Image (cartoon, rainbow, N blue to C red):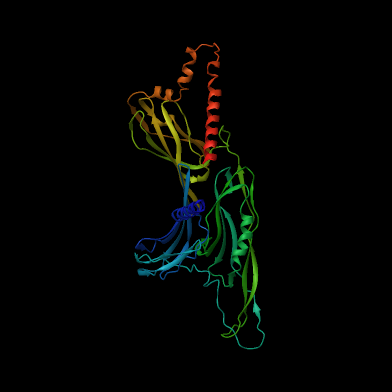
């Protein structure tokens, strides 16, 4: 019987574990609007909840659209101590012409599982036609095809001068401790480049590149570039295609200068035949390593302040919400204190609360949103409080909720202060609050009791009597058992 029960318990446990895993994670593919104009982008978004986004297929290609790059965002909720999170990757498509396009159904593998999308019809409107450049690294100008000559005579190959470079760019050259700056590593190819170039073992090279790019004394928010797509840019009035390899925002943890060494990227560069023909080999494979310049970012200490080692750094605002402006004593109300803006949202701590006997406040539920887009990291962190008033009166929440931070734009400390008030009506609950913290009636009797020691021998006969009674029961039980 015990074996069957144990087996049943194991089965139920496995079912509960499996069921919890199913409902704790979900993946969705979301397609953009039905109608866009030529100066707008169409998007496809992968959203995963309850699990980290580890891998996903390349986004599909569609006729009439070109890929313009991805952006990512994440969201974290903490409710009653339970943590849930979601992560999103969005691919933006730029329309190349007007008309009605049918995006066929497609499948994408996310974290090793297949997910389907039914596709949709998208109408591209507006006569504003913009010149589009090729975003695919697999097409000209990087992958030019040259003919050949079947002639057995050895061909002469020449090295064509390339017009390309790799650059590591920081959005700021000087920051405060905790202030974010964005680092971008990209390969730039001139529109008039004639040298055939091609990426070479990029995944293998990236692992070594990232070890050099990522500073050890910084918090990192990675933009998670999974697909390298070309983006048209203009530098000194000259057109280039920018292939973004890495992008991340760093937040220094101390005042040490951050050094980015020179980064090398090996490319396949082909020599071309001096006299190309339609048949035969007309290019010869070779390699060239492009190097970026080393960069330094100076980090400054925060100005003197009692909380300078504990405050968040960024450009923040306050959004607050109170579910009621008037309430009875003893009843509960909810208050949301939400900090939003640009900065390291993960480092935002809950506000310090000034406590007294007028209110009982409980630890907040926490919700966090982080968005990485357009080389900026923005987001919000919300603290949802529940409170119970004990004393009637008009109260300003600014007397209870304040949050101090350092704004690097103004180079000053600032305080986010509540602007809301709450009116409490009803009878005072302060006495009940005191009684709830009372030590009890046992201690109230102390002053009424004397200090005279009293003997407890009056009850000494009880214990031996009880032992004799128990012994008799044991003897009688043994007698009946042997007799039977």
- Label count reads 0
Farthest residue in the front direction?
483
- Would residue 105 be seen by someone viewing this image from the given angle? yes
Horizontal placement of 396 versus 460: left or right?
left
Farthest residue in the right direction?
154
Counting from the top left corner in percent of width and height, residue 470 is at 53, 30
In which image quadrant can residue 277 be found? bottom right
Near-viewer residue (185 or 27): 27
Identified at 40% across, 22% down, the residue is: 431
Identified at 40% across, 70% down, the residue is: 64
Horizontal placement of 228 versus 266: left or right?
left
Farthest residue in the bottom direction?
151
Near-viewer residue (81 or 11): 11
Counting from the top left corner in percent of width and height, residue 279 is at 58, 86
Counting from the top left corner in percent of width and height, residue 292 is at 63, 59
Counting from the top left corner in percent of width and height, residue 157 is at 65, 79
- Would residue 160 be seen by someone viewing this image from the given angle? no
Near-viewer residue (29 or 139): 29
In which image quadrant can residue 243 be found? bottom right
Location of residue 422 with respect to 461 vertically, above or below: below
């Amino acid at each position: 019987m015990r074996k069957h029960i144990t087996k049943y318990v194991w089965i139920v446990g496995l079912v509960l574990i499996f069921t919890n895993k199913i409902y704790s994670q979900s993946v969705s593919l979301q397609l953009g609007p039905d109608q866009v104009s030529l100066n707008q982008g169409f998007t496809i978004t992968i959203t995963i909840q309850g699990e980290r986004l580890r891998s996903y297929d390349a986004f599909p290609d569609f006729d009439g659209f070109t890929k313009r790059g991805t952006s990512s965002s994440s969201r974290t909720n903490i409710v009653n101590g339970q943590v849930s999170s979601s992560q999103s990757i969005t691919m933006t498509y730029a329309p190349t012409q007007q008309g009605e396009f049918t995006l066929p159904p497609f499948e994408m593998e996310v974290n090793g599982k297949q997910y389907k999308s039914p596709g949709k019809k998208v109408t591209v409107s507006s006569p504003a036609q913009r010149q589009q450049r090729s975003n695919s690294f697999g097409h000209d100008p990087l992958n030019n095809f040259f003919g050949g000559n079947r002639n057995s005579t050895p061909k002469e190959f020449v090295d064509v001068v390339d017009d390309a470079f790799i650059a590591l760019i920081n959005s700021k050259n000087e920051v405060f401790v905790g202030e974010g700056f964005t680092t971008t590593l990209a390969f730039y190819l001139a529109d008039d480049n004639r040298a055939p170039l091609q990426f070479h073992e990029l995944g293998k090279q990236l692992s070594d590149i990232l070890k050099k790019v990522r500073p050890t004394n910084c918090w990192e928010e990675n933009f998670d570039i999974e697909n390298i797509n070309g983006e048209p840019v203009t530098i000194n009035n000259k057109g280039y295609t920018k292939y973004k390899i890495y992008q991340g925002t760093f937040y220094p943890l101390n005042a040490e200068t951050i050094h980015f060494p020179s980064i090398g990227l090996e490319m396949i560069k082909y020599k071309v035949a001096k006299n190309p023909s339609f048949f035969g080999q007309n290019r010869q494979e070779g390699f060239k390593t492009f190097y970026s310049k080393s960069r330094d970012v100076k980090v400054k200490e925060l100005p003197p302040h009692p909380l300078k080692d504990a405050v968040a750094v960024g450009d923040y605002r306050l959004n607050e919400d109170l579910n009621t402006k008037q309430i009875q004593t003893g009843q509960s109300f909810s208050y949301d204190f939400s900090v939003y803006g640009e900065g390291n949202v993960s480092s935002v701590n809950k506000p310090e609360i000034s406590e007294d006997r007028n209110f009982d406040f409980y630890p907040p539920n926490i919700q966090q949103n982080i968005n990485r887009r357009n080389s900026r990291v923005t987001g919000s962190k919300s603290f949802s409080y529940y409170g119970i008033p004990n004393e009637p009166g008009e109260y300003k929440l600014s007397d209870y909720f304040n949050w101090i931070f350092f704004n690097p734009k103004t180079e000053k400390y600032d305080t986010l202060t509540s602007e809301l008030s709450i009116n409490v009506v009803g009878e005072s609950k302060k006495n009940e609050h005191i009684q709830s913290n009372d030590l009890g009636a046992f201690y109230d009797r102390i002053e009424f009791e004397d200090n005279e020691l009293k003997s407890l021998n009056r009850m000494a006969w009880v214990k031996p009597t009880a032992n004799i009674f128990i012994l008799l029961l044991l003897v009688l039980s043994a007698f009946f058992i042997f007799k039977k």
